[in-house]
Amino acid sequence: MKIPPPTPADRARHGGWLLPWLSLAAFGALTPHEWQHRQVFTVNEPGLTRIAVTAETMTHAQPSLSDMRILDEAGREVPYWIDGRFSSHHDPQTETPPRVAARNFTSFDTTAGTQLLIETGLTGELEAIELTTSSAGFFLAAHVEISADGNQWKSLGPAVPIFRNLGAEQLRLALSRQRAAFVRVTLDEPRATSDPARRDATHPRVPFTGALVQAAPIHATPPRLTPLGVAVERREEFAGVTTLTLQLAGRHAPLATLSFASSEPLFMRHVTVAVREMQGGEAGERVIATGTIYRVALAGTAVREQLALPLDYLPTNRELIVHVHNGDSPPLVIDAVHAKRRAIEVRFVAQQVGEYQLLLGNPQVGAPRYDLALFTDELSRAETKVVTAGSAQPMPHYRPRETVSSLPDTDVPLIGAPLDTTNWRHRRPLQLARPGVQQIELDLAVLAYAQPDLDDLRIVQDRHQFPYLLERTKLMRKSSVPIFPAPDNKRPTVSVWRMPLPHVGLPTRELGLSSDTPLFDRTIKVYEMRRSASGQRRAHTLSQVKWSHVPTDQRTAWTHLVLTERPLTDTLWFETDNGDNPAITLKPVTLFTPVVRLVFKADEAEGFALIYGNAEVSAPRYDLRLLARQLLSASRNVATLVGDGTVAPPSLWARLLSGNSGMVLFWATLTLVVIVLLLVVARLLPKPPAG
């Protein structure tokens, strides 16, 4: 008999009839051995029961817990309902409304600083306003007031910081669900005076051009959060960036925040969070969150800080990549990283006491559809008994359905075809700490002597090649390279410097110059000497930049050059015309090179090598791409290249046999042989008779 759905009046009386009605549902038997794991728990009292979903439960289940099933002691399926939201994008009641432009925005210049008057244009509760400006760098204190009519104003408390610096910015002013037709922001600018003209001359006013207004979400109750374990697996320092590789305590846990603990007293940093994935056939990173963390001090107020980065992400694996952008500041001290996830609970009606099972890990089934969806409001408000599930255990006699196949995991040996390595010029042994998934960062020698597109890279062991994934990152390594004056006597007003590169044809695209000269205004040109088709050496310009510095700037003079193409020689030249001014000095040049990695799996730790330097081969094609997701999500070991990768200079005989010298030697030898043969033939010919 089909039971009719309850009416609104029936729902209001859920306490007296809900549980008996739910107990009428009957479900067919499952086949438990098709699930990979189970968690056992005991129900001591019948009725509405709830279980807190742990990180371990989410790790073994499919995303969104679609494969989770509950069995009672008799092996019958028990309907359940998930209490908690995996993402705000799935719930319009908690989704943050979009930002809209303010109806009116006016900026005034007062004796205290700049004052902004904003007409919101919204009548409901407001979450925040965000200021817009084109200024690249500033740090100000903002006093926020609200009003319903533009005449009576109410302060929202002490001043709050707003700033922008090297990607880190804080332009959002919280309104804490206040209703406000008008918002007034007064900015305390440094060195403010009663004379606006004088103030603008000493410290230009920051031009704010508008404001975006954000209404508060309809649902007033924020989602419940619970800690999620996280460990810093590896910390690496790159050019201006600190990279943290994090390992979460579980996968499929709906992340809500990521917070950072630092002992530094004052700082501001731009932070990006990314995950590894395949992009265009190569391993790369996809950014899932960006934001700013800071700890700053305003005059007359307590230290303000924001150390949590909001997330709304359901990770498919345990790894997160965090990039902390330091700019020219020293690397930020990070003492610990903490994560929080949305709290998820499972509610069900236990008809009898006994031992129950929570089944997890079956990619061959879809999400169940139970009639409990009709009673979500009632189940959320009703009193429940709390039970705790045990740890996840492998299902005895696990056997998935034979009609569905899945990709093999990373336990499958990954080995490629045999390879004749005769035509590769360079061979570098690899040092592996232990078997497993390995990561190799290519050094300057590999980047210089391999093909420009790195198509000739191979990982070999006993003449067999091992497939790998090529991972190009947006990170850069920096190194200091000495620079030497090379005066040109024919041009006494021109300063010339010579910089030897560590390797011929090094793929560098960015250079950093610094100088201790207090006052100058120059154009710096970078070039290399290349041979033309006729054999003449000519200067080939790679970049030039306008560079100036004044004594009032306390920082060391610094400029950044982007090369238009990859150098082809082993020397770069720098040149500037001083005119009638004294020559400037240059410190060692900062060389920026890209970070490129190879990722592969090794079942043992001995006998591996990286070969490169073959201009005749094309990029390899491996079936490893089928396992790219599993390989990228696995924990990595850092392998290292042995040796410096330098090439020994060729012998005299090799130089004579190579290139144009080889052709000259060939024809010279052939000519000598012909002359010798002619002499021999001449001696063998009979002599003419005398007279």
Image: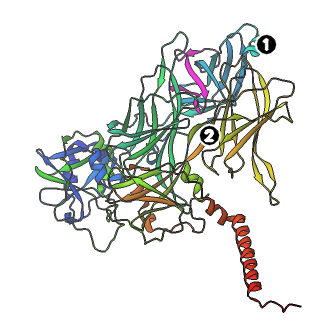
Helix, strand or loop at mark 1: helix
Distance from disc 2 to disc 1, alpha carbons, whole Å, reads: 43 Å
The residue pinned by badge 2 equals 591
Read off the magenta span: 150-177
Q: Nearer the viewer, residue 145 or 653?
A: 653
Q: Residue at x 76, y 82 (%)?
A: 678
**Rendering colour mode:** rainbow
Quadrant assignment for the C terminus: bottom right
**Extreme residue in the front direction:** 691
Residue 73: image quadrant is bottom left
Would residue 405 be found to the left or right of residue 539 on screen?
left
Tell me the amino acid under the disc marked 2: Leu
Secondary element at image label 2: strand
Task: Report the mark closest to the observer, 2 or 1.
Answer: 2
> Is 164 in the magenta?
yes
Residue 196 point in image, percent of width and height:
76, 12
Q: Residue pushed farthest top?
A: 194
Callout 2: few (<14), some (14-19), or many (20+) C-alpha neighbours within 10 Å? some
The answer to whether residue 95 is seen in the rendering is yes
Residue 494 place in picture, x, y as percent:
82, 33
- Residue 185's spot in the image, x, y percent? 62, 20
Instruction: Using the image, determine if residue 417 lies above or below residue 590.
Output: below
Let me know if residue 93 appears in the view. Answer: no
Disc ID at residue 197: 1
The residue nearer to you, when weighing 658 against 53, is 658
Q: Is residue 561 above or below residue 61?
A: above
Q: Which secondary structure type mostly characterizes the magenta part of the structure?
A: strand
Q: Is 118 in the magenta? A: no
In the image, which disc is placed on residue 238?
none
Residue at the extreme right of the image, as rendered: 691
- Amino acid, disc 1: Ala
Identify the image quadrant of residue 213: top right
